[in-house]
Image: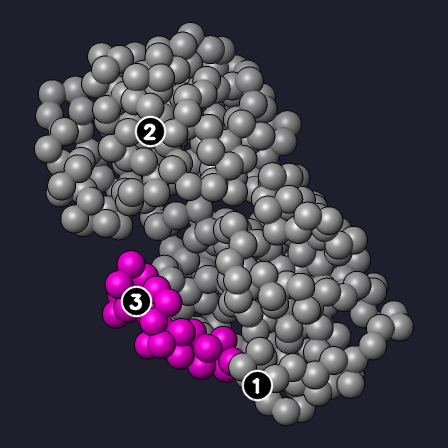
Amino acid sequence: MKIALMTHIRHPLRPPFMGGMEAHGWHLARELAARGHEVTLFASGDSVPPPGVRLHAVLEEHYDRRYPWHDFHGTDTLNDLLDATFAAACRDVAAGAFDVVHNNTLHRFPPRLSRARRLPMVSSMHVPPFAALRRAMGDSVAPWHLVTTCSRLQLGRWWEVPPASARVVGNGIALADWPFSASGDGSAVWAGRITPTKGTHLAVQAARIAGVPLTLYGVIEHRDYFEDEIAPLLGGDIRYGGHLAGVDLALAFGRASALLFTPLWDEPFGLAAIEAMACGLPVAAVEMGAVREVIGPCGTYAPPNDAEALARALVKAMSLPREAARARVEEKFSIRAMVDGYEALYAEAVAAREGDWPGIAYAPHELEVTPEVVTAGA
């Protein structure tokens, strides 16, 4: 197939990845290209696509460099930039003669483009619902526009009664990139974006209470949070190990005995958890969102903001079998399983394009592309 893979543009798609969405998009592109598809990656211009994947820059550089999300989220400045960027991207997609579009943008224009132009599309919802995108998903329902969430819990967050076009496709990783290690050194690790919603401080507190050495890995997204709440707790057996490329992070996971996973938001999935589990790590987790659905019996759980309970969970987790953690990822969360699921949906969306379905027209603020695109099929 000729596939347009549209991504979120807050960060570039290049290793080392800023977060799960960037890792998901890059590895999805790599696997699709390896399967023989012609993939065009619609991403920021400072992305580095996998071999065999064409980059279509929708913005010269990722927007977080000039307009940090934490400062500009919800402002007219950022909203206008994103609207103009995705309007142009939708024009390019519509003109590109693609067989199917995989939309990971979290913007309201692409799903409506699919509905208006009868353009086969799979839209993947990587975050809990917010108002503008929920409206777009509601008014873009069509047999050729299929929607995925990465967990059953998130499916229920988006719809009380999901439409027939909504499915669950779990995230997946390339197992060879995360090799299994049969034993650990008695320490714990934490990995992710260092920001309040990821609960880095809670991991540090729990490790200190449990007396377990801990290394933190990841990009410092919230500098004030790091300086005020994390840096004062570092020292001794608690250290910050930097933001590592995947191969180095896999080695760090393999040396440790457990992962601390501490989301303090409605976690849709938890990619860092399955990466660590593939390396053999049981998980001590804060039970938020889909955490238990993903980790299952390979983890122990604590309620949010309870460092004492998390410390007890950490000690228990270190006695869980490492082989079971790897086996769960192999069974449920391989990139092969994920892309098999997406490929089946691509084919279904393409086949449904010719069905009988009424046309639609959107107001300019709902889909700003061109009049031709907006009214097509009406």
Q: Position of residue 354 (x, y in %)?
A: 86, 72
Q: Residues within 10 Å of mark 2 (few under 14, many from 20)?
A: some
- On screen, residue 7 versus residue 237, left or right, reads right
CB under 8 Å between callouts 3 and 1? no
Q: Earlier in the sequence, mark 3 or mark 1?
A: 3
Q: Which residue is mark 2?
A: 305
Q: Where is 252 relative to 314, above or below?
A: below
**Element at label 2:** loop
Q: Earlier in the sequence, mark 3 or mark 2?
A: 3
Amino acid type shown at disc 2? Asn
Give the dominant element type of the magenta stretch: helix, strand or loop. helix
In the picture, the quarter occupied by the C terminus is bottom right
Q: Which residue is mark 1?
A: 364
Which segment is the magenta one?
61-88
3D distance between C-alphas at marks 1 and 2: 44 Å
Task: Tell me what residue is drawn at x 51 percent, y 19 percent.
Answer: 298
Q: Where is 291 relative to 347, above or below?
A: above
Number of the front mark, 3 or 2 = 2
